[in-house]
Protein backbone atom coordinates (compact mmCIF):
# COMPACT_ATOMS: atom_id res chain seq x y z
CA UNK A 1 0.00 0.00 0.00
CA UNK A 2 1.38 3.41 -1.00
CA UNK A 3 1.70 5.28 2.29
CA UNK A 4 2.56 8.91 3.06
CA UNK A 5 3.79 9.64 6.56
CA UNK A 6 4.04 13.25 7.78
CA UNK A 7 6.42 14.11 10.60
CA UNK A 8 4.94 17.19 12.28
CA UNK A 9 7.43 17.29 15.15
CA UNK A 10 8.00 21.00 14.49
CA UNK A 11 4.36 21.86 14.00
CA UNK A 12 2.30 22.19 10.86
CA UNK A 13 1.98 25.08 8.43
CA UNK A 14 0.58 25.16 4.92
CA UNK A 15 3.69 26.44 3.16
CA UNK A 16 5.95 23.94 4.93
CA UNK A 17 3.64 21.05 4.07
CA UNK A 18 3.50 22.15 0.44
CA UNK A 19 7.31 22.37 0.33
CA UNK A 20 7.74 18.88 1.82
CA UNK A 21 5.27 17.33 -0.64
CA UNK A 22 6.85 19.24 -3.51
CA UNK A 23 10.10 17.38 -2.91
CA UNK A 24 8.24 14.11 -3.51
CA UNK A 25 6.77 15.29 -6.81
CA UNK A 26 8.43 14.01 -10.02
CA UNK A 27 8.44 17.52 -11.54
CA UNK A 28 8.58 20.20 -8.81
CA UNK A 29 9.32 23.05 -11.20
CA UNK A 30 6.48 22.00 -13.49
CA UNK A 31 4.11 21.83 -10.53
CA UNK A 32 4.99 25.38 -9.44
CA UNK A 33 4.39 26.60 -13.01
CA UNK A 34 1.04 24.81 -13.00
CA UNK A 35 0.09 26.35 -9.64
CA UNK A 36 0.99 29.86 -10.83
CA UNK A 37 -0.91 29.25 -14.07
CA UNK A 38 -4.12 28.90 -12.05
CA UNK A 39 -3.98 32.68 -11.72
CA UNK A 40 -5.06 32.93 -8.12
CA UNK A 41 -5.59 36.71 -7.99
CA UNK A 42 -2.37 38.68 -7.38
CA UNK A 43 -0.54 35.58 -6.08
CA UNK A 44 2.86 34.21 -7.10
CA UNK A 45 4.38 31.02 -5.68
CA UNK A 46 8.11 30.30 -5.64
CA UNK A 47 10.07 27.30 -4.36
CA UNK A 48 13.72 27.69 -3.40
CA UNK A 49 16.40 25.46 -1.85
CA UNK A 50 16.81 25.98 1.88
CA UNK A 51 18.88 24.61 4.75
CA UNK A 52 18.19 24.09 8.45
CA UNK A 53 20.56 22.48 10.93
CA UNK A 54 22.72 21.20 8.08
CA UNK A 55 19.80 19.56 6.25
CA UNK A 56 18.82 20.70 2.77
CA UNK A 57 15.22 20.98 1.69
CA UNK A 58 12.74 23.37 0.12
CA UNK A 59 11.19 26.63 1.23
CA UNK A 60 8.03 27.86 -0.48
CA UNK A 61 7.32 31.58 -0.70
CA UNK A 62 3.90 32.96 -1.58
CA UNK A 63 3.71 36.64 -2.43
CA UNK A 64 0.67 38.83 -2.93
CA UNK A 65 1.11 41.89 -5.14
CA UNK A 66 4.81 41.02 -5.15
CA UNK A 67 5.19 41.26 -1.38
CA UNK A 68 5.66 38.80 1.43
CA UNK A 69 4.85 40.00 4.91
CA UNK A 70 7.71 39.68 7.36
CA UNK A 71 7.76 39.79 11.12
CA UNK A 72 10.28 40.29 13.91
CA UNK A 73 9.92 38.52 17.22
CA UNK A 74 10.39 40.03 20.65
CA UNK A 75 12.52 37.79 22.87
CA UNK A 76 12.74 37.43 26.59
CA UNK A 77 10.57 40.29 27.87
CA UNK A 78 6.98 41.30 28.27
CA UNK A 79 5.43 43.67 25.82
CA UNK A 80 2.34 45.72 26.42
CA UNK A 81 0.99 45.37 22.92
CA UNK A 82 1.11 42.96 20.09
CA UNK A 83 2.46 44.98 17.20
CA UNK A 84 4.78 47.84 16.53
CA UNK A 85 3.89 48.76 13.00
CA UNK A 86 4.55 51.67 10.78
CA UNK A 87 0.79 51.28 10.46
CA UNK A 88 -1.57 50.22 13.22
CA UNK A 89 -4.09 47.39 13.06
CA UNK A 90 -7.12 47.38 15.28
CA UNK A 91 -7.76 43.68 14.84
CA UNK A 92 -6.48 40.44 16.30
CA UNK A 93 -3.68 38.81 14.40
CA UNK A 94 -4.20 35.24 15.42
CA UNK A 95 -7.22 34.01 13.51
CA UNK A 96 -10.07 34.89 11.18
CA UNK A 97 -12.61 37.45 12.23
CA UNK A 98 -16.33 37.23 12.48
CA UNK A 99 -16.96 40.93 12.12
CA UNK A 100 -16.58 43.71 9.63
CA UNK A 101 -14.76 46.81 10.75
CA UNK A 102 -12.93 49.83 9.44
CA UNK A 103 -9.15 49.85 9.71
CA UNK A 104 -7.58 52.94 11.15
CA UNK A 105 -4.27 52.59 9.33
CA UNK A 106 -3.51 54.79 6.43
CA UNK A 107 -3.45 52.19 3.66
CA UNK A 108 -5.36 49.15 2.57
CA UNK A 109 -3.98 45.82 1.41
CA UNK A 110 -6.03 42.95 0.20
CA UNK A 111 -4.03 39.96 1.25
CA UNK A 112 -5.41 40.43 4.76
CA UNK A 113 -2.72 38.60 6.75
CA UNK A 114 -3.36 37.73 10.34
CA UNK A 115 0.23 38.65 11.10
CA UNK A 116 1.06 35.56 13.02
CA UNK A 117 -1.43 32.95 14.08
CA UNK A 118 -2.16 31.00 11.01
CA UNK A 119 0.47 32.90 9.06
CA UNK A 120 1.98 29.99 7.26
CA UNK A 121 4.87 31.88 5.74
CA UNK A 122 6.59 33.00 8.92
CA UNK A 123 5.39 30.61 11.59
CA UNK A 124 7.25 29.33 14.61
CA UNK A 125 7.73 32.75 16.19
CA UNK A 126 9.23 33.25 19.62
CA UNK A 127 6.81 34.47 22.22
CA UNK A 128 7.00 38.25 21.81
CA UNK A 129 5.35 38.45 18.41
CA UNK A 130 5.74 42.18 17.98
CA UNK A 131 5.74 42.65 14.25
CA UNK A 132 7.48 45.55 12.58
CA UNK A 133 6.46 45.95 8.97
CA UNK A 134 8.72 48.05 6.82
CA UNK A 135 6.90 47.56 3.54
CA UNK A 136 4.49 50.12 2.18
CA UNK A 137 1.69 49.21 -0.13
CA UNK A 138 -1.56 50.76 -1.19
CA UNK A 139 -3.88 47.92 -2.01
CA UNK A 140 -7.10 47.20 -0.21
CA UNK A 141 -7.26 45.18 3.02
CA UNK A 142 -9.89 42.52 2.35
CA UNK A 143 -11.88 40.22 4.60
CA UNK A 144 -13.14 37.04 2.95
CA UNK A 145 -15.89 34.68 4.04
CA UNK A 146 -16.77 31.21 2.85
CA UNK A 147 -18.84 32.67 0.00
CA UNK A 148 -15.86 34.60 -1.39
CA UNK A 149 -13.53 31.65 -0.91
CA UNK A 150 -15.98 29.32 -2.65
CA UNK A 151 -16.24 31.76 -5.54
CA UNK A 152 -12.46 31.86 -6.01
CA UNK A 153 -12.12 28.07 -5.81
CA UNK A 154 -15.04 27.42 -8.16
CA UNK A 155 -13.26 29.33 -10.92
CA UNK A 156 -9.92 27.52 -10.63
CA UNK A 157 -9.01 25.02 -13.34
CA UNK A 158 -8.60 22.08 -10.96
CA UNK A 159 -10.44 18.77 -10.57
CA UNK A 160 -13.73 18.48 -8.71
CA UNK A 161 -12.01 16.34 -6.07
CA UNK A 162 -9.35 18.99 -5.48
CA UNK A 163 -12.06 21.63 -5.13
CA UNK A 164 -13.87 19.44 -2.61
CA UNK A 165 -10.66 19.00 -0.62
CA UNK A 166 -9.91 22.74 -0.61
CA UNK A 167 -13.42 23.65 0.53
CA UNK A 168 -13.38 20.90 3.17
CA UNK A 169 -10.17 22.35 4.63
CA UNK A 170 -11.74 25.80 4.71
CA UNK A 171 -14.83 24.23 6.25
CA UNK A 172 -12.73 23.02 9.18
CA UNK A 173 -11.26 26.48 9.64
CA UNK A 174 -14.62 28.20 9.33
CA UNK A 175 -16.21 25.86 11.87
CA UNK A 176 -13.37 26.50 14.31
CA UNK A 177 -13.69 30.27 13.89
CA UNK A 178 -17.46 30.00 14.29
CA UNK A 179 -17.02 28.31 17.66
CA UNK A 180 -14.38 30.82 18.80
CA UNK A 181 -16.49 33.85 17.97
CA UNK A 182 -19.94 32.42 18.64
CA UNK A 183 -21.12 33.27 15.14
CA UNK A 184 -22.71 31.14 12.40
CA UNK A 185 -20.29 29.77 9.84
CA UNK A 186 -21.67 31.97 7.08
CA UNK A 187 -20.85 35.07 9.15
CA UNK A 188 -17.22 34.14 9.76
CA UNK A 189 -14.73 36.37 7.97
CA UNK A 190 -11.17 35.27 7.46
CA UNK A 191 -8.09 37.39 7.78
CA UNK A 192 -4.95 35.40 7.08
CA UNK A 193 -6.70 32.11 6.48
CA UNK A 194 -8.96 33.76 3.94
CA UNK A 195 -6.15 35.71 2.32
CA UNK A 196 -4.94 34.88 -1.12
CA UNK A 197 -1.60 33.49 0.04
CA UNK A 198 -3.41 30.94 2.22
CA UNK A 199 -5.59 30.00 -0.76
CA UNK A 200 -2.39 29.21 -2.64
CA UNK A 201 -1.08 27.08 0.25
CA UNK A 202 -4.28 25.06 0.57
CA UNK A 203 -4.78 24.62 -3.17
CA UNK A 204 -1.13 23.64 -3.57
CA UNK A 205 -1.27 20.98 -0.88
CA UNK A 206 -4.56 19.56 -2.16
CA UNK A 207 -3.22 19.32 -5.71
CA UNK A 208 -0.01 17.67 -4.53
CA UNK A 209 -1.97 15.12 -2.53
CA UNK A 210 -4.06 14.39 -5.62
CA UNK A 211 -1.04 13.97 -7.89
CA UNK A 212 1.05 11.94 -5.43
CA UNK A 213 -2.06 9.79 -4.83
CA UNK A 214 -1.07 7.86 -1.69
CA UNK A 215 -3.43 5.07 -0.63
CA UNK A 216 -3.32 6.35 2.91
CA UNK A 217 -1.88 9.32 4.78
CA UNK A 218 -0.61 9.08 8.34
CA UNK A 219 0.86 11.71 10.64
CA UNK A 220 2.88 11.98 13.81
CA UNK A 221 1.34 13.81 16.76
CA UNK A 222 1.58 17.56 16.14
CA UNK A 223 3.96 19.81 18.07
CA UNK A 224 2.06 23.05 18.72
CA UNK A 225 4.78 25.03 20.52
CA UNK A 226 4.28 26.73 23.86
CA UNK A 227 3.90 30.05 25.64
CA UNK A 228 1.67 32.92 24.73
CA UNK A 229 1.23 35.35 21.88
CA UNK A 230 0.19 38.97 22.02
CA UNK A 231 -2.57 40.52 19.98
CA UNK A 232 -4.41 43.81 19.88
CA UNK A 233 -7.17 42.39 22.10
CA UNK A 234 -5.01 40.69 24.71
CA UNK A 235 -2.73 37.74 25.37
CA UNK A 236 -3.61 34.38 23.87
CA UNK A 237 -2.17 30.95 24.70
CA UNK A 238 -0.45 28.69 22.18
CA UNK A 239 -2.09 27.05 20.30
CA UNK A 240 -4.40 29.91 19.33
CA UNK A 241 -8.13 29.35 19.95
CA UNK A 242 -9.01 28.52 16.35
CA UNK A 243 -6.04 26.17 16.01
CA UNK A 244 -6.93 24.47 19.29
CA UNK A 245 -10.48 23.90 18.05
CA UNK A 246 -9.29 22.36 14.79
CA UNK A 247 -6.89 20.06 16.64
CA UNK A 248 -9.52 18.57 18.95
CA UNK A 249 -9.36 14.80 18.79
CA UNK A 250 -5.81 14.83 17.37
CA UNK A 251 -2.71 13.93 19.44
CA UNK A 252 -0.76 17.13 20.13
CA UNK A 253 1.96 18.23 22.52
CA UNK A 254 3.87 21.34 23.58
CA UNK A 255 7.54 21.67 24.29
CA UNK A 256 10.46 23.89 25.17
CA UNK A 257 10.18 25.95 22.00
CA UNK A 258 8.42 29.23 22.75
CA UNK A 259 6.12 30.30 19.98
CA UNK A 260 3.36 29.14 17.68
CA UNK A 261 4.42 26.14 15.61
CA UNK A 262 1.04 25.05 14.27
CA UNK A 263 -1.18 27.40 12.28
CA UNK A 264 -4.91 27.04 11.62
CA UNK A 265 -4.21 26.34 7.96
CA UNK A 266 -1.61 23.68 8.73
CA UNK A 267 -3.81 22.08 11.38
CA UNK A 268 -6.79 21.91 9.02
CA UNK A 269 -4.74 20.42 6.17
CA UNK A 270 -3.24 17.67 8.31
CA UNK A 271 -6.56 16.91 9.98
CA UNK A 272 -8.34 16.67 6.63
CA UNK A 273 -5.85 14.36 4.96
CA UNK A 274 -4.42 12.19 7.75
CA UNK A 275 -6.45 9.10 8.60
CA UNK A 276 -4.41 8.17 11.66
CA UNK A 277 -1.96 9.80 14.07
CA UNK A 278 0.87 7.95 15.75
CA UNK A 279 4.35 6.55 15.28
CA UNK A 280 5.66 5.81 11.82
CA UNK A 281 4.53 2.37 10.64
CA UNK A 282 6.83 -0.28 9.22
CA UNK A 283 7.29 0.81 5.62
CA UNK A 284 9.82 0.76 2.80
CA UNK A 285 10.54 4.46 2.28
CA UNK A 286 11.22 5.42 -1.33
CA UNK A 287 11.23 9.24 -1.11
CA UNK A 288 11.80 11.83 1.60
CA UNK A 289 10.88 15.51 1.41
CA UNK A 290 11.83 18.37 3.74
CA UNK A 291 9.72 21.52 3.86
CA UNK A 292 11.28 24.39 5.81
CA UNK A 293 9.81 27.40 7.57
CA UNK A 294 11.47 30.78 7.88
CA UNK A 295 12.45 30.79 11.55
CA UNK A 296 15.52 29.15 13.04
CA UNK A 297 15.45 27.07 16.22
CA UNK A 298 17.80 24.58 17.83
CA UNK A 299 15.69 21.92 16.16
CA UNK A 300 15.20 21.95 12.40
CA UNK A 301 12.08 23.98 11.63
CA UNK A 302 10.60 21.62 9.08
CA UNK A 303 7.96 19.11 8.14
CA UNK A 304 9.34 15.83 6.81
CA UNK A 305 7.23 13.77 4.41
CA UNK A 306 8.07 10.12 3.77
CA UNK A 307 6.51 8.24 0.87
CA UNK A 308 6.83 4.49 0.48
CA UNK A 309 5.20 1.10 0.60
CA UNK A 310 3.57 -0.43 3.62
CA UNK A 311 2.61 -4.11 3.46
CA UNK A 312 -0.51 -3.39 5.49
CA UNK A 313 -1.00 -7.02 6.42
CA UNK A 314 -3.64 -5.96 8.83
CA UNK A 315 -3.81 -6.01 12.59
CA UNK A 316 -5.07 -8.38 15.24
CA UNK A 317 -8.37 -7.98 17.03
CA UNK A 318 -10.24 -10.07 19.57
CA UNK A 319 -13.72 -11.45 18.89
CA UNK A 320 -15.73 -12.16 22.06
CA UNK A 321 -18.95 -14.22 21.77
CA UNK A 322 -21.69 -15.52 24.04
CA UNK A 323 -25.09 -17.16 23.58
CA UNK A 324 -28.19 -15.58 25.16
CA UNK A 325 -31.62 -17.19 25.42
CA UNK A 326 -33.18 -15.41 28.40
CA UNK A 327 -32.75 -11.68 27.76
CA UNK A 328 -35.20 -9.16 26.34
CA UNK A 329 -34.26 -7.20 23.21
CA UNK A 330 -34.18 -4.00 25.28
CA UNK A 331 -31.67 -5.51 27.74
CA UNK A 332 -29.47 -6.76 24.91
CA UNK A 333 -29.60 -3.32 23.27
CA UNK A 334 -28.57 -1.70 26.55
CA UNK A 335 -25.61 -4.09 26.82
CA UNK A 336 -24.54 -3.28 23.26
CA UNK A 337 -24.47 0.45 24.03
CA UNK A 338 -22.25 -0.11 27.07
CA UNK A 339 -19.82 -2.20 25.01
CA UNK A 340 -19.52 0.51 22.37
CA UNK A 341 -18.82 3.06 25.10
CA UNK A 342 -15.99 0.86 26.34
CA UNK A 343 -14.22 0.94 22.98
CA UNK A 344 -15.71 -1.99 21.09
CA UNK A 345 -15.02 -1.86 17.35
CA UNK A 346 -18.33 -3.51 16.56
CA UNK A 347 -21.13 -5.28 18.42
CA UNK A 348 -23.83 -7.32 16.72
CA UNK A 349 -26.24 -10.20 17.28
CA UNK A 350 -26.96 -13.32 15.25
CA UNK A 351 -30.12 -15.39 15.50
CA UNK A 352 -29.35 -18.95 16.64
CA UNK A 353 -31.21 -21.99 17.96
CA UNK A 354 -30.09 -23.52 21.27
CA UNK A 355 -30.84 -26.78 23.09
CA UNK A 356 -34.46 -27.70 23.73
CA UNK A 357 -35.30 -25.83 20.53
CA UNK A 358 -35.06 -22.47 22.20
CA UNK A 359 -34.61 -19.45 19.90
CA UNK A 360 -31.70 -17.27 21.04
CA UNK A 361 -29.11 -14.78 19.90
CA UNK A 362 -25.33 -14.89 19.80
CA UNK A 363 -23.80 -11.61 20.94
CA UNK A 364 -20.48 -10.86 19.23
CA UNK A 365 -18.16 -8.06 20.24
CA UNK A 366 -15.00 -7.15 18.33
CA UNK A 367 -12.35 -5.18 20.21
CA UNK A 368 -8.65 -4.45 20.43
CA UNK A 369 -6.45 -6.42 22.80
CA UNK A 370 -6.06 -3.50 25.19
CA UNK A 371 -9.85 -3.28 25.69
CA UNK A 372 -10.42 -7.00 26.06
CA UNK A 373 -10.47 -7.35 29.86
CA UNK A 374 -12.76 -4.37 30.38
CA UNK A 375 -15.20 -5.62 27.75
CA UNK A 376 -15.31 -9.16 29.14
CA UNK A 377 -16.20 -7.66 32.50
CA UNK A 378 -19.01 -5.62 30.93
CA UNK A 379 -20.40 -8.65 29.08
CA UNK A 380 -20.69 -10.55 32.35
CA UNK A 381 -22.19 -7.51 34.08
CA UNK A 382 -24.82 -6.61 31.48
CA UNK A 383 -25.81 -10.02 30.11
CA UNK A 384 -26.97 -13.31 31.63
CA UNK A 385 -24.26 -15.40 30.02
CA UNK A 386 -22.20 -17.82 32.08
CA UNK A 387 -19.26 -17.89 29.66
CA UNK A 388 -17.53 -15.85 26.96
CA UNK A 389 -15.64 -17.35 24.01
CA UNK A 390 -12.52 -15.67 22.65
CA UNK A 391 -11.16 -15.76 19.10
CA UNK A 392 -8.07 -13.87 17.96
CA UNK A 393 -8.53 -12.66 14.39
CA UNK A 394 -6.39 -10.92 11.84
CA UNK A 395 -8.24 -8.32 9.81
CA UNK A 396 -7.49 -6.29 6.71
CA UNK A 397 -8.80 -2.74 6.66
CA UNK A 398 -9.10 0.20 4.31
CA UNK A 399 -7.66 3.55 5.35
CA UNK A 400 -10.40 5.80 6.65
CA UNK A 401 -10.72 9.54 7.01
CA UNK A 402 -13.47 12.08 7.42
CA UNK A 403 -13.93 15.44 5.75
CA UNK A 404 -16.56 18.11 6.17
CA UNK A 405 -18.32 19.92 3.35
CA UNK A 406 -20.37 23.09 3.64
CA UNK A 407 -23.76 23.23 1.91
CA UNK A 408 -26.58 25.72 1.80
CA UNK A 409 -28.35 23.49 4.34
CA UNK A 410 -25.50 23.13 6.82
CA UNK A 411 -22.30 21.14 7.13
CA UNK A 412 -22.14 17.45 6.26
CA UNK A 413 -19.48 14.88 7.06
CA UNK A 414 -18.22 12.47 4.44
CA UNK A 415 -16.47 9.22 5.30
CA UNK A 416 -13.76 8.27 2.80
CA UNK A 417 -12.05 4.88 2.56
CA UNK A 418 -9.15 3.86 0.34
CA UNK A 419 -6.56 1.16 -0.18
CA UNK A 420 -6.22 -2.24 -1.81
CA UNK A 421 -7.02 -0.60 -5.14
CA UNK A 422 -10.36 0.86 -4.09
CA UNK A 423 -11.57 4.31 -3.08
CA UNK A 424 -15.10 5.31 -2.11
CA UNK A 425 -16.98 7.77 0.07
CA UNK A 426 -20.28 7.98 1.91
CA UNK A 427 -22.22 10.74 3.62
CA UNK A 428 -22.66 10.46 7.38
CA UNK A 429 -26.15 9.23 8.24
CA UNK A 430 -26.75 11.66 11.10
CA UNK A 431 -26.00 14.69 8.92
CA UNK A 432 -28.30 13.48 6.13
CA UNK A 433 -31.07 12.84 8.66
CA UNK A 434 -30.68 16.30 10.23
CA UNK A 435 -30.92 18.05 6.87
CA UNK A 436 -33.92 15.89 5.91
CA UNK A 437 -35.72 16.89 9.12
CA UNK A 438 -34.74 20.57 8.81
CA UNK A 439 -35.91 20.75 5.19
CA UNK A 440 -38.96 18.52 5.72
CA UNK A 441 -37.91 16.20 2.92
CA UNK A 442 -37.14 12.53 2.47
CA UNK A 443 -33.79 10.94 3.22
CA UNK A 444 -33.09 10.46 -0.52
CA UNK A 445 -34.05 14.09 -1.26
CA UNK A 446 -31.67 15.27 1.46
CA UNK A 447 -28.82 13.40 -0.22
CA UNK A 448 -29.67 15.13 -3.49
CA UNK A 449 -29.68 18.52 -1.74
CA UNK A 450 -26.25 17.87 -0.22
CA UNK A 451 -24.76 16.67 -3.50
CA UNK A 452 -26.20 19.67 -5.33
CA UNK A 453 -24.74 21.99 -2.70
Image: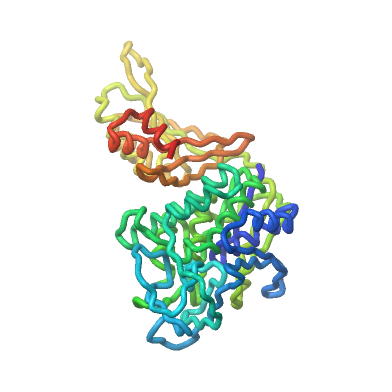
x then y, percent, for residue 104: 38, 78
Quick one: which residue is furthest to the bottom in this view? 77
Please state if 453 lies on the left or on the right of 222 as rendered.
Answer: left
x then y, percent, for residue 116: 48, 72
**Picture quarter containing residue 11?**
bottom right
Vertical comparison of 58 with 204: above or below: below
Query: Is residue 131 or residue 347 the one in the foreground?
Result: 131
The quarter of the rendered structure image containing the N terminus is top right
The image shows a total of numbered marks equal to 0
**Picture quarter containing residue 439?**
top left
Query: Is residue 227 or residue 155 the one in the foreground?
Result: 155
Please state if 140 lies on the left or on the right of 291 as rendered.
Answer: left
What colour-coding does the image apply? rainbow
Q: Is residue 374 visible?
A: no
The quarter of the rendered structure image containing the C terminus is top left
Q: Is residue 341 visible?
A: yes
x then y, percent, for residue 80: 38, 86
Residue at horizontal 39 percent and vertical 83 percent from the top: 81
Residue at horizontal 50 percent and vertical 63 percent from the top: 195
Residue at horizontal 36 percent and vertical 44 percent from the top: 410
Residue at horizontal 32 percent and vertical 54 percent from the top: 184
Vertical comparison of 210 with 43: above or below: above
Vertical comparison of 150 with 367: above or below: below
Please state if 13 lies on the left or on the right of 22 as rendered.
Answer: left
x then y, percent, for residue 64: 57, 67
Query: Is residue 366 or residue 68 the one in the foreground?
Result: 68
Amino acid sequence: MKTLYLECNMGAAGDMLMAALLELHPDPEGFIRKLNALNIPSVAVKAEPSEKCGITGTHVTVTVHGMEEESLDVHGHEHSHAHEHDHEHDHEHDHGHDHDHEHDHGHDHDHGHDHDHGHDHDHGHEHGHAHEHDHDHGHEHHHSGMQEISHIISHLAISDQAKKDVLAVYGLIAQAESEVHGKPVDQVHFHEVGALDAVADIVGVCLLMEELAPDRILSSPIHVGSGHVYCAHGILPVPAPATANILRGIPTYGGAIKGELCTPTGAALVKHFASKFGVMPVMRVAQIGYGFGTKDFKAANCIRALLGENDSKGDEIVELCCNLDDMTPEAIGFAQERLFEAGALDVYTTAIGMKKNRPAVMLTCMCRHEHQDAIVQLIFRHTTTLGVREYVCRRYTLARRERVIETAYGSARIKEVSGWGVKREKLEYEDIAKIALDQNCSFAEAIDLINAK
